[in-house]
Image (cartoon, helix red, strand yellow):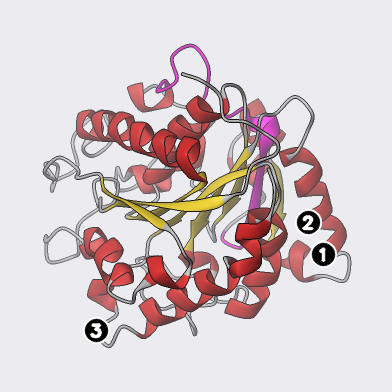
Amino acid sequence: MRAIATHRRVKSIGIVGAPSALGIRPYASGEARHLDRAPGVLRALCLADRIRAVDFGDVTPPAYRDYLRPIGRARNEPELAAYSAALGERVTTAIESQGFALVLGGDCSIVLGSLLGARQAAGGPIGLAYFDAHADFATPEESRNGSVAGMSLALAVGHGETPLACLAGCFPLVEAGHVALLGRREGKELADLQADRAAAAILDLSTEALEDEPGKAALERAMERLTAPALRGFWIHLDVDVLNPLQMPAVDSPVPGGPTLDALMRLLKPLVRHPKALGLDLAIYDPGLDPDRTGAGRLAGLLEKLFAPSFHRMQR
């Protein structure tokens, strides 16, 4: 596959829908979660027109199978492997066509297919900015519920005995030393959660680190990592539970605290507008927990501010 050009190109946005809940456990009632409805809910708010994007449609997932946790593997493991490959193909097309892909999910497992597609489009190694209130660094053996959404970062760096850690073949989707975890506020330091070189290599910038006076310097450290000369670009994963649940309660595992919408926009803006940014996936918004669509409206407003008309005037 031809790598995308990295200069003299107007950057635009290609939307890809990833209506998948394959990577997350069902509700307590046993019903599959409604994260698959999120792309449609956001589109109904005229998102494509508001951010002047080209819509590449949805990548439809296989049926949800593992309502009960399987023994010895993650939920819906074969289905997620196939879905990640299909999603990756669509993301590659969107990036090659428009320069930047916006993937509307879906649970956090969509980052795997997004990285696969971005890596293919870039034609080489990429970095990852991972915005999440959680570390998402469990393995199938360690996970309490078998949900890939809680393993996504570990799998992306090739950690774990599962085919989902080998989606790019011999190489991880992204090297741990090219990852910045931003906004985590649950549990211990990442390096303490796993006595593992992959975890220790990740730049772990908690909410506190980003909110402190040196927060700007912390973000600059992340940017240096994501834009290293050896990298062909970087991807942004946005789990909306990184937001303060007072502003975004429609998530499955809210954690107290966290940035406001305005604070998050200030963190995201220099990333999405950087020439080496390949795309962003938005995950974990659950319309089933947002009956009046307040959360959807806030997310659409955030995206509109991020991708204001000036975004389209940037040159690659």
Residue 20 within the segment the image draws in magenta: no
All told, the count of numbered labels is 3
Residue 160: image quadrant is top left
Residue 215: mark in rendering: 1
Residue plotted at (56% across, 61% down): 186
Q: Position of residue 252 (x, y in %)?
A: 34, 66
Residue 179 within the segment the image draws in magenta: yes
Taking the image as shown, residue 23 lies to the left or right of residue 195, namely left
Compute the Cα span from label 1 to label 2. 6 Å
Residue 219: mark in rendering: 2
Q: Position of residue 137 (x, y in %)?
A: 51, 41
Residue 212: image quadrant is bottom right
Taking the image as shown, residue 192 lies to the left or right of residue 98, namely right
Compute the Cα span from label 3 to label 1. 35 Å
Report the amino acid beneath label 3: Pro
Q: Position of residue 217 (x, y in %)?
A: 87, 58
Residue plotted at (68% across, 41% down): 276
Task: Answer whether residue 141 is visible to the viewer in this image.
Answer: no
**Earlier along the polypeptide chain: callout 3 or callout 1?**
1
| Residue placed most toward the observer, 163 or 304 | 304
Residue plotted at (48% across, 67% down): 51
Magenta span? 166-186
Residue 40: mark in rendering: none
Provide the secondary structure element on which disc 1 rests.
helix
| Residue designated by label 3 | 291
Q: For the C terminus, which image quadrant?
A: top right
